[in-house]
Image (tube, rainbow, N blue to C red):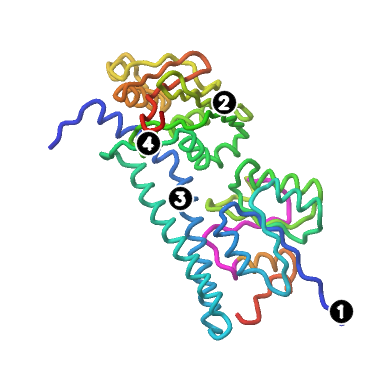
Amino acid sequence: MMPQAPLRVLYIEDNALVREITCDLLADDAREIVAVATGEEALSAFEASRFDIVVTDVSLPAMSGFELVRRVRKLAPSTPVILASGYPLDLEEIRLGTHIRTITKPFNAPELEALIEDLCGPAAGAPKQSD
Amino acid sequence: MKALSLGDVLDAAAYAFVGERCRDAHIHDIRGELQTLQSSLELLARAARNPGENIALAEKATALARRALANHEKSLVDFVNQTTPHEEAAVAVDVCDMVNRALLILRNDVANKSITFKVESAADLRILAQPHRSRLLILGLLATTIDELSAGSVVKVLLSREDSQVVIEIQSDAIGRAVRAPEDQWSGAAQTVTPLDLLLAVTSRWAAANGGRVSQVPRELRIYYPRSQSDS
């Protein structure tokens, strides 16, 4: 049986500590995490490569997470998105379309993995074997 | 009990307003630090389940947790100091850093209204000022500027030197009314005071008490404040 390609996750978070530690928690054989600090870097990465899901902080310098999602959706309209924020978010108010979930900080890895699984399928959010 | 002066009352009102206005932004930043702590604990738990192979992971998680705790403590102290009037010693404060910190706190407000801030700054613009008080006033002035602007507006913040003074210039459609003396606002002539009026009044008193001044013409607010002697 051919091994399944890892899920490619584009992760955007301007807080360096949060970015680093979330990558440590999420990356494994089933998931490849590409982490960047700004919306501009994320767009460059998205234009250069394919991603299965975008996980982004909302409060980013210069380009907000909302604006980033609008631009990503122009490039690939059905890309699943998870918006992470220190503010509770109202999906109806955000109006960014479908295939979107929100998560409020501080969240734990299983909560985020459950959302990834919800959007991308069961294997995508599977926790690490050692867990 | 200490009698309250008009200045004390204006100070309390300004701190209360900015504290409430920026409450969500502060909570947001504190939750970001808690996120690092939460994730550090998860990493430590993962390492504990397999201690032989995960010493490096445990050490990394512990180091990240320590940094997050230090950041969190600083944020909480800053939050308390920026929401309560208190005595503080004047130190050299970089005006450009002060403006950038305020815009970082307000980044969600800026994004939500699609406001564009253009900041131009000369080098070495340090003033001798009470750090929390001066940051609060700049934060409040920029927050109220955002509140009074329509979506898509542009704000220019020009930071420069003029003789021995640092000039903080804010150009926007929100600026326009003449600065009224605080005493006039409490005289009964004015039935209501806008948050921007309040912050301008407190800022005027703050600048005047330190040898500076505030001037305002339509679309342009200028705060003149003496430069710190240590950087001349």
Point out which mark residue B181 bears: none
What separation in Å lies between label 4 and label 3 (alpha carbons)? 28 Å
Q: Quadrant of residue B185?
A: top left
Quadrant into which the N terminus of chain B falls? top left
Q: Amino acid at mark 2?
A: Lys
Q: Is residue B194 above or below residue A96?
A: above
What separation in Å lies between label 4 and label 2 (alpha carbons)? 24 Å
Which sits earlier in the primary sequence, circle 4 or circle 2? 4
Depth order, front residue of B207/A73: B207
Q: Which residues are magenta?
A: A94-111
Q: Amino acid at mark 1?
A: Met
Query: Which-is-in-front pick, marks 3 and 1?
Result: 1
Query: Which-is-in-front pick, marks 1 and 2?
Result: 2
To which chain does the residue with label 3 belong? B
Disc 1 target residue: A2
Q: Position of residue A129 (x, y in %)?
A: 65, 81
